[in-house]
Image: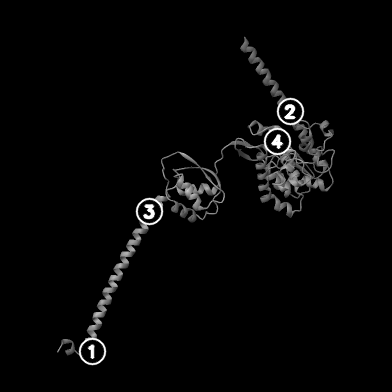
């Protein structure tokens, strides 16, 4: 008879349970050990991966100063950009760069254009530059200050080797040439491009045609106007072209930015009261040549830009206004002022009545006369000094 048969049933069950418990315990130990091995393996993989990720995000060659021009096309995705940069050997790994872009949450903010990059830049530096839109500008640089008039603009363009004066003048006088592309020029009141050649710093490639130059400036005007000015003009129910004309007057009359909206308010107040604008800056635009000072005889010159003789706004803008003046013309400051004088100190003196204004105007003329007399004396003194030095040198 076997031992199993000799043991009581209850005892046999107890031993069987012990065996099962031991097996379960061993199984748990094996599973636990396996989990530890997996955990350690994953930790090692994560550590190695993190080290590789950090390394792959670093600059390709931190010691180099060589710069590489890269062009990012419009609509490029992170994947497209990574391919361009990897082909130029500016990044170590495409997938890591894509991950960097996504982690920065700037995938949609990368701006198209030419960029000057280097192998000494890590992925973050490259991404920051692409997001900031710090594009590399090559070509001929031309800067037009706010308030530039068409003749000044054309002079600069011609002197920079960007086309012929005759072609520019012809295009300037024919805004309909651009009206299909820039519909705001289809307005029948617009007879020239004055007011729409946005003052800015531009870079033009050598060989750019005269029409392309003007198109770039018109595109900049359209972008600035649509984004910043159009909503205000529509809200205040203003006329588009009249707003541009007013902005150009403000641009030529204002010295300080903080005065622009007040000056616009003064001119609008005068228009509301059917008063002539009497702007020297506008009159200057209609004179054969610009003067340092408008004289009394100039006030009688027959020109549509003489607002001492003619009511309302001039027929065209008298300059190309910048954003601040456009904003002021679209949103003038509400005051009771009807007059202002810019003193020789550069400050504006505003008046509600003609009597107040006359006091400021008389003081301005007196100060101006004294200043001109002082300048004349200093000039003569300088000339005499030069003559004495010349005479002494000859001896």
Question: Which label's residue is closer to the chain start, 3 or 2?
Answer: 3
4 vs 3, front mark: 4
Decide if residue 137 is on the left or right side of residue 145. Answer: left
Tell me how far mark 3 sits from mark 2, CA to CA: 73 Å
Question: Which label's residue is closer to the chain start, 1 or 2?
Answer: 1
Label 4 crowding class (10 Å Cα cut-off): few <14, some 14-19, many 20+?
many
Tell me how far mark 4 sits from mark 1, CA to CA: 113 Å
Question: Which label's residue is closer to the chain start, 4 or 1?
Answer: 1
Q: Which mark is residue 326?
A: none
Q: Which residue is identified by label 2?
A: 372
Above or below — where is 329 with respect to 395? below
3 vs 2, front mark: 3
Question: Which label's residue is closer to the chain start, 4 or 2?
Answer: 4
- Residue 362 at x, y = what percent? 79, 35
Element type where label 3 sits in the image: helix
- Which quadrant of the view contains residue 66? top left
Q: Which residue is identified by label 4?
A: 168
Quadrant containing the N terminus in the rendered view: bottom left
Question: Which label's residue is closer to the chain start, 3 or 1?
Answer: 1
Q: Which residue is identified by label 3?
A: 51
Label 3 crowding class (10 Å Cα cut-off): few <14, some 14-19, many 20+?
few
- Residue 395 at x, y = what percent? 62, 9
Name the residue at the left extreme: 1
Q: State the residue in front, 193 or 205.
A: 205
4 vs 1, front mark: 4
Q: Which residue is identified by label 1?
A: 10
Tell me how far mark 1 sits from mark 2, CA to CA: 127 Å
Element type where label 1 sits in the image: helix
Tell me how far mark 3 sits from mark 1, CA to CA: 61 Å
4 vs 2, front mark: 4
- Residue 236 at x, y = what percent? 75, 53
Above or below — where is 11 with respect to 152? below
């Amino acid at each position: 008879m076997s031992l199993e048969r000799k043991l009581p049933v209850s005892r046999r069950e107890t031993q069987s349970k012990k065996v099962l418990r031991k097996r379960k315990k061993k199984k748990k130990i094996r599973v636990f050990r396996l989990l530890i091995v997996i955990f350690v393996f994953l930790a090692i993989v994560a550590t190695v991966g993190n080290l590789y990720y950090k390394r792959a995000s670093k600059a390709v060659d931190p010691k180099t100063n060589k710069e590489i021009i890269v062009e990012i096309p419009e609509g490029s995705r992170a994947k497209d950009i990574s391919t361009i940069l990897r082909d130029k050997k500016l990044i170590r790994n495409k997938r890591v760069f894509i991950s960097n872009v996504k982690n920065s949450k700037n995938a949609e903010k990368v701006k198209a254009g030419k960029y000057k990059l280097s192998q000494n830049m890590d992925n973050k530096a490259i991404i920051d530059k692409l997001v900031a839109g710090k594009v590399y500008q090559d070509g001929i640089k031309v800067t037009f200050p706010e308030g530039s008039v068409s003749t000044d603009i054309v002079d600069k363009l011609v002197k920079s080797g960007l086309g012929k004066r005759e072609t520019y003048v012809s295009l300037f006088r024919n805004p309909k040439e651009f009206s299909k592309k820039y519909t705001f020029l289809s307005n029948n009141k617009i007879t020239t491009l004055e007011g729409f050649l946005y003052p800015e710093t531009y870079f033009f490639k050598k060989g750019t045609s005269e029409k392309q130059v003007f198109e770039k400036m018109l595109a900049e005007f359209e972008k600035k106007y649509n984004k910043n000015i159009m909503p205000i003009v529509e809200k205040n129910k203003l006329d588009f072209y009249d707003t541009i004309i007013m902005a150009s007057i403000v641009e030529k009359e204002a010295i300080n930015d903080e005065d622009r909206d007040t000056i616009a308010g003064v001119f609008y107040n005068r228009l509301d009261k059917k008063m002539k604008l009497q702007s020297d800056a506008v009159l200057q635009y209609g004179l054969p040549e610009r003067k340092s000072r408008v004289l009394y005889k100039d006030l009688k010159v027959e020109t549509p830009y003489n607002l001492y003789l003619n009511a309302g706004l001039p027929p065209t803008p008298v300059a190309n206004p910048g954003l601040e003046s456009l904003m002021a013309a679209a949103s003038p400051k509400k005051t009771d002022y009807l007059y202002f004088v810019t003193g020789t100190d550069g400050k504006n003196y505003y008046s509600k009545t003609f009597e107040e204004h006359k006091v400021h105007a008389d003081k301005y003329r007196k100060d101006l006369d004294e200043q001109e007399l002082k300048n004349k004396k200093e000039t003569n003194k300088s000339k005499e000094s030069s003559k004495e030095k010349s005479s002494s040198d000859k001896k």
